[in-house]
Amino acid sequence: MEDTMRDEYTLADVKNLVRGKHYEEYQRHIQAKGNATLEPDIRAAFPTDEAVNAALRSLIQSGAVKVAPAPERDAEPVTR
């Protein structure tokens, strides 16, 4: 297969650019998946998924946080 990528592109090469075009859809998607956005100070204290999960599990085990049953989620179809 021939490489058709150029070394450089200009804005004239790419038409109809819209900043944030898919932002709202992306936000709905990550919220539906149960993702959370960490503020910079929290991210500094808990830099990995494992660190965040360990800290939250510790709160749950201490009884400081009550856990509601997880809602059942239907499998989402894969769209491309």
Image (cartoon, rainbow, N blue to C red):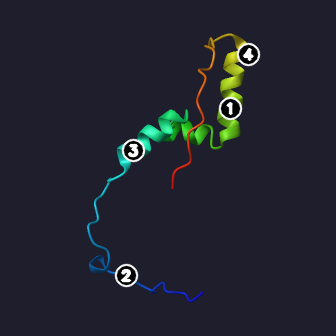
Q: Which mark is residue 61?
A: 4
Which mark sits nearer the N-terminus, 2 or 1?
2
Instruction: State the CA–CA distance, disc 3 to disc 1.
Output: 26 Å
Viewer-nearest of discs 2 and 3: 3
Q: Which residue is mark 3?
A: 25
At x 37% / y 81%, what residue is drawn? 9
Instruction: State the CA–CA distance, disc 4 to disc 1.
Output: 12 Å
Position of residue 65 relative to residue 12, above or below, is above
Quarter of the rendering occupied by the N terminus: bottom right
For the residues bearing labels 4 and 3, Cβ distance under 8 angstroms: no
What's the amino acid at mark 2? Tyr
| Residue placed most toward the observer, 51 or 9 | 9
Instruction: State the CA–CA distance, disc 2 to disc 3.
Output: 27 Å
Would residue 58 be found to the left or right of residue 8 on screen?
A: right
Q: Which residue is mark 1?
A: 53
Q: Which residue is mark 2?
A: 9
Q: Where residue 47 sits in the image (x, y, percent)?
A: 63, 43
Which mark sits nearer the N-terminus, 4 or 3?
3
Assess disc 4: are there few (<14), some (14-19) or many (≥20) residues with their C-alpha within 10 Å of its C-alpha: few
Viewer-nearest of discs 4 and 2: 2
Q: Which mark is residue 5?
A: none
Tag 3's secondary structure? helix
Would residue 38 be found to the left or right of residue 70 on screen?
A: left
Q: Where residue 64 sits in the image (x, y, percent)?
A: 64, 11
Instruction: State the CA–CA distance, disc 4 to disc 3.
Output: 35 Å
Which mark sits nearer the N-terminus, 4 or 1?
1
Tag 4's secondary structure? helix
Viewer-nearest of discs 4 and 3: 3
Residue 68 sits in which quadrant?
top right
What's the amino acid at mark 1? Asn
